[in-house]
Amino acid sequence: MRIGGWDIQIVSGGTFRLDGGAMFGTVPKMVWNPLMPADEENRILMGTNCLLLRGETAGRSHVILVDTGNGDKESEAFRDRFQIQGPGILDTSLARHGVKPEDVTLLVLTHLHFDHAGGATRIDERGELVPSFPKARVVVQKRDLMDAKRPNLRVKASYFPKNWEPLEAAGLLDTLDGPAELLPGLSVRMVPGHIAGLQMVVVESNGKKLFFPADLIPTSRHIQPAWVMGYDLDVVTCVNERLKLLEEVTGTGAVLVFEHDPDVPVGTVSQDAKGRYVVTPVISQRFEELVRVTI
Ligand SMILES: [Zn+2]
């Protein structure tokens, strides 16, 4: 996909599984289970669909990654609990596009939860924690970094210092204070609700738009505004932020990336006769192959 000067691909950090009830909040299982079938532990399959952007501005070339999936450094027990695929999925997925970790110039983290920032650091041959993308500046919202460093009990299980401390130690971590244009045609907006410091990535040129709303709308099945997650801290804000985004994209052909969708990573949005939102997958099969990377 191309928007303006940006060449855009979906890369995968591998699949994992989360409790279906937690992913669908108050939506009854008899409604969500046919859409995303649960396994014997009530877990549903999730993707970690990340964004790869390549382009040139003012004679400088950019290789930009948005989010990184769960990464490879968790214990066997942790990987087993969440059925984290890998190791090596993100590297393999990037390599398919000819990108090596040291080629990445900018890493945008929508937030620091482990299923988004886990791949930002890795354990090297000497057993030390190091940035996975040694030459990439990393941007995250100041508010999220603050919350990650002093998490309340409700979110503590999602924030692991090992996912950002090596970035800070290497002097690679920059914070943003609210919405920002990162490069021409590439910006971030605040979309609070899931957490206060969540940022959405927007790629835009000549009326063509792509949105990467991360956990604001984690899968295409979460397109109904009230279908929020048990993980969302402020559900009313989340619903309102979804409505705002849906108003902007519905019927326009703008593309949404669903970071956690296992088989519809990219789609456009319309409304049916009853006013319900409908996602039309964009070249689903090609992306499906990219999303379900096996090595
Ligand atoms: Zn997530």
Image (spheres, grey):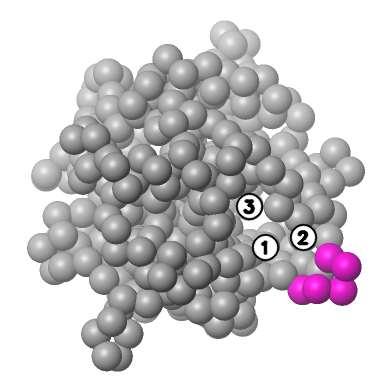
Residue 58 highlighted magenta (yes or no): yes
Q: Main secondary structure of the magenta part?
A: strand
Q: Nearer the viewer, mark 3 or mark 1?
A: 1
Report which residue position mark 3 lands on: 283
Circle 3 packing at 10 Å, graded few (<14), some (14-19), many (20+), is few
Residue 118 highlighted magenta (yes or no): no
As measured in the structure, the alpha-carbon distance from the residue carrying label 3 to the one carrying label 1 is 18 Å
Disc 2 marks a residue whose amino acid type is Trp
Disc 3 marks a residue whose amino acid type is Ile
| Outermost residue, top side | 274
Disc 1 marks a residue whose amino acid type is Leu
Q: Nearer the viewer, mark 2 or mark 3?
A: 2
| SS type, badge 1 | strand
For residue 238, which numbered disc appears in the image? none
- Residue 201 coordinates in the image, percent (x, y): 62, 45
Say which quarter of the image contains residue 160. bottom left
Say which quarter of the image contains residue 135. bottom right
Q: Which quadrant does the C terminus fall into?
A: bottom left
Report which residue position mark 1 lands on: 53
